[in-house]
Amino acid sequence: MVPLSWYIMLSAVVFSIGVLGFLMRRNLIMVFLSIELMLNSINISLAAFSHYLQSITGQIMVFLVITVAAAEAAIGLAILMAFYKNNPTIKADEINLLKG
Amino acid sequence: MTLPQLFFAYFAVSITGLSLLVVTRKNPVHGVLWMLVLFVHIAMLYLFLNAEFLAAIQIIIYAGAILVLFLFVVMLLNLRVEETERRFQWSWPVGLVAAGGYAVSLIFILVKITVFPQPGHYTIEKMQTEGNLMIIGKVLYTKYLLPFEITSLILLVAIIGAVVLTKKKQE
């Protein structure tokens, strides 16, 4: 039997790698991909809790998280396309329209 | 180590390595394709946790829809010039320190955590006799009906938002 804490550790490590990618990458597509990575790590921990607490709620929350992730990816990439049409760069450190 | 623990060790090592590959590849297409392999591994981990429905939608929705959307945008923007440039921001050491500190503190907290399971109704035997999908459907359409409907509203907002954001301005 695999202990529950192993799954939670794996989830924490993958979440931290997602945070790392979110903070480090310049390409905005990779930043969005890091957000997907973080959502997936949370899904792992929710599914593990669902299995070990013998409750179905965790799996339903994973279902809802996946739906929100799909909506977030669609909206985020649409914003990216709209931005790219005006000034052709998707570098996170070159986008400073709101800088005072 | 027992056999399930060996399986879990393989999945843990490969998922960690694959997510590191995803965040460090220079070419966004390679990153997205490594993400595909990562999603397949996560789907197998769901099978390991007796969540067959989640494994199926992980493959169908994440790998089939979201990653294809990412690949589509990567190819549409045609970032061939960008491959020669640096891939990290100048402030990447700050990000490394922040994420590393976050990971270490999270692990120090999680080592001390104890979960007192109050076993629920949905044991593995019940899951196997009644079927994972049927149980999820029953609970989703009765107890969690309102969140399910709100999810449909979120999807509607996403559809309208994507159309409005990308359409041409009327002159």
Image (spheres, rainbow, N blue to C red):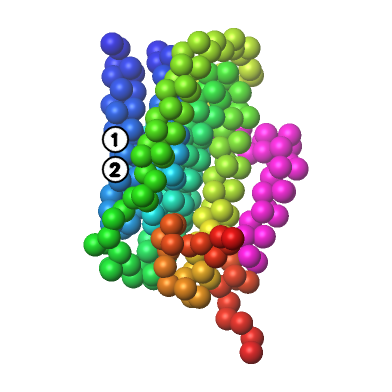
Tell me which corner region of the image, top left, top right, bottom left or bottom right, holds residue B169. Answer: bottom right
Residue at 39% over, 54% down: A26
In this orientation, does residue B52 appear? Answer: no
Characterize the local packing of mark 2: few (<14), some (14-19) or many (20 or more) Cα atoms within 10 angstroms.
some
| On-image quarter of the N terminus of chain A | top left
Secondary structure character of the magenta stretch overall: helix
| On-image quarter of the C terminus of chain A | bottom right
Residue at 42% over, 23% down: B104
Q: Which mark is residue B21?
A: 2
The residue nearer to you, when weighing A42 against A95, is A95
Q: Position of residue B38 (x, y in %)?
A: 35, 41
Report the magenta residues as a range.
B132-161
Characterize the local packing of mark 1: few (<14), some (14-19) or many (20 or more) Cα atoms within 10 angstroms.
some
Say whether residue B146 is magenta: yes
Q: Verify CB contact (< 8 Å) between mark 1 and mark 2.
A: yes
Q: Which mark is residue A51?
A: none
Give the residue at mark 1.
Answer: B17
Q: Position of residue A78 (x, y in %)?
A: 53, 65
Tell me the chain of label 2.
B
Vertically, is B115 above or below B159? above
